[in-house]
Amino acid sequence: MKKIVLFTAGLLAMALMGFGFDAQAQGKTAQPATAKTADTATQTKGDTAANSPSDTAAAESAAPVNEGGDSIHYVFKQKFIEGDVIWMAPVLICLIFGLGVIIERVIYLNLATTNTTKLLAKVEDSLKAGNLEGAKEICRNTRGPVASIFYQGLERSGEGVDIAEKAVTSYGSVQMGQLEKGLIWISLFIALAPMLGFLGTVVGMIQAFDAIEIAGDISPSLVAGGIKVALLTTVFGLIVAMILQVFYNYLISKVDSLVNTMEDSSISLIDLLVKYGKK
């Protein structure tokens, strides 16, 4: 499962880094394009006066339009660059690794889901026929923690129901730990992302006050850069925390559901062992 985390984190990193490089390239090419446009306008100032109104209208209609200038994707990229990569990159890293762990956990928990009703029916049929090995084989061929717990209980059933119950309880605790594995990292990223955003906020405000101290005067344009960094890092940190929190709550509910299923199924297995005389 570690390979899944690394693989998904790598894919997310490449996608998001490509997104950042695209935004940075757009920011760099904006200035040369503007300068070129200004020079062209200066050189052709005399020529435009001789053009007819129809030619001017045709030229305006043929001018390139910034199709993505008002899109959410474009705005997001621009704000990411304006927020200063030094403080935005750690928040982005929290998002990448947090989503990587989430994807791995979603895959694992979905694979751990078992149709316990069908499994119990098959085990009961085997035990009713006195085929203990057949019941074990059914559990070995079934995916999920419930089947693993059943196998441990059936393996120790020859030593008595009490021993089998202890084996089921002990192995159930192990399986519960496997289900909760990795969730601590998601909670860490949820707490860390806004903290990094607040750190960028503090640093941005310090930069703003430094600029005021150096200039000896307060003007909106002077402190706007530092305040913008402060606000953008906080916004992005909170957005990342909210995204991860939604998935974290989903995973917690999934784990709780699986644990309840494990407990109910374990009780049913012990009842079957008592019923069919495996003491």
Image (cartoon, rainbow, N blue to C red):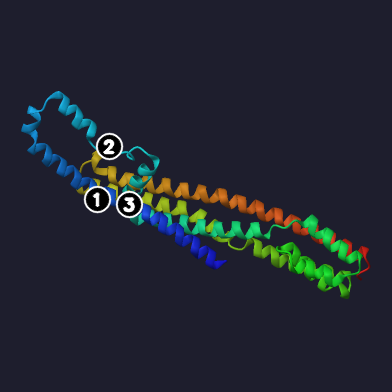
Looking at the picture, does residue 109 appear above or below residue 49? Answer: below
Looking at the picture, does residue 166 appear above or below residue 110? Answer: below
* Residue identifier under label 3: 22
86 sits left or right of 220 in the view: right
Q: Residue at x 72, y 58 (%)?
A: 114
The kind of secondary structure element at disc 2 is loop
Q: Earlier in the sequence, mark 3 or mark 1?
A: 3
Displayed quadrant of residue 264: bottom right
Q: Position of residue 13 (x, y in %)?
A: 43, 59
Q: Residue at x 50, y 50 (%)?
A: 241
List the single residue furthest toward the left.
Answer: 46
Distance (Cα) linking label 2 and label 3: 18 Å
Q: Position of residue 146 (x, y in %)?
A: 75, 62
Q: Earlier in the sequence, mark 2 or mark 3?
A: 3
Where residue 65 is drawn, which disc sits there? 2
The disc labelled 3 sits on which kind of residue? Asp
Crowding near the residue tagged with mark 2, few <14, some 14–19, many ≥20 C-alpha atoms within 10 Å: few
Where is the N terminus found, in terms of image quarters?
A: bottom right
Residue 169 makes an appearance in the image = no
165 sits left or right of 194 in the view: right
267 sits left or right of 234 in the view: right
* Residue identifier under label 1: 28
